[in-house]
Amino acid sequence: MTDRPWFERRIVPVLRERMRESPVVALQGARSVGKSTVLRLIAEQHGVEVIDLDSEIQRRRADASPTDLVDGDPPVCIDEYQRVPGVLQAIKAQLNRQHVNGGFVLAGSSSFWALPRGTQSLTGRLHLMEIMPLSQGEIDGVREDFLTVALEDPDRLGAAGPRGARQRHVMSTYNASAEAGSLVDSGLAAHLLGISAEKLERRDAAMLAEFGHLLENFRRRRTPQAGVLA
């Protein structure tokens, strides 16, 4: 199977900014939304390796000596850090010795707050960032301005009509599951994606209509009543 295309993620420049402000940044989110990909990008840009605790060899190393694991050139990039909870304590000890912003970038599929002792280890030193699935703008390679348009020129929202629902669903499915790549050419997969895309189109139309009602009510409230002095 060919490599997946790289999409420019909006979260990357935000992540770099958080690294300048916090000693530890942790990426979390659902499976296959791009956490490991973003982590690898950050590691490559800084000339360091990703420590992948999904690897049995790396887990054994971490279990044997988490202190040695986290004692590397910054940023120390650790994927699936929740697999070895002792890593968080080792990071805390390292920061007690030397507090450096951008020293650690972590990625994990489990919620940080659900980890044992997780909230005690790095309170005040860790910035959590939630990675969401690809947006349509990221897929298309354009900058989204939905909120700006909604508040400043709401008539533009319905002008383009329904766009790309089928593509949006196929691409999000492709990124949400590695297994989907092997099914994308099969008739069964195409049929199932087609059904889901139709449901998505109906859902989007209903949501857009509801948003239009809410926006109209919001605009009316902002408009001064006739004869009432501001």
Image: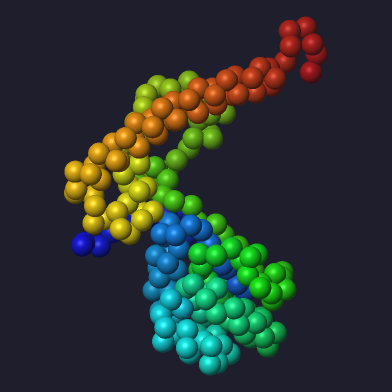
The C terminus lies in which quarter of the figure?
top right
Q: Where's residue 143, x and y in %?
A: 42, 43
One can see residue 164 in this view: no
In-front residue for pair 165/140: 165
Residue, x 58% and y 81% (percent of image)?
Answer: 87
Q: Where's residue 169, x and y in %?
A: 35, 41
Residue, x 65% and y 82% (percent of image)?
Answer: 89
One can see residue 184 in this view: yes
As drawn, which residue projects farthest toward the front?
Answer: 188
Residue, x 47% and y 88% (percent of image)?
Answer: 60
Q: Where's residue 117, x and y in %?
A: 69, 74
Up-down: is 52 above or below 135?
A: below
Up-down: is 130 above or below 145?
A: below
As drawn, which residue projects farthest toward the top?
Answer: 227
Residue, x 50% and y 68% (percent of image)?
Answer: 107
Image coloring type = rainbow
Q: Where's residue 84, x and y in %?
A: 55, 80
As drawn, which residue projects farthest toward the right?
Answer: 229
Q: Is residue 198 left or right of residue 91?
A: left
The N terminus lies in which quarter of the figure?
bottom left
Residue 67 image-quadrant placement = bottom right
Number of numbered discs on residues: 0
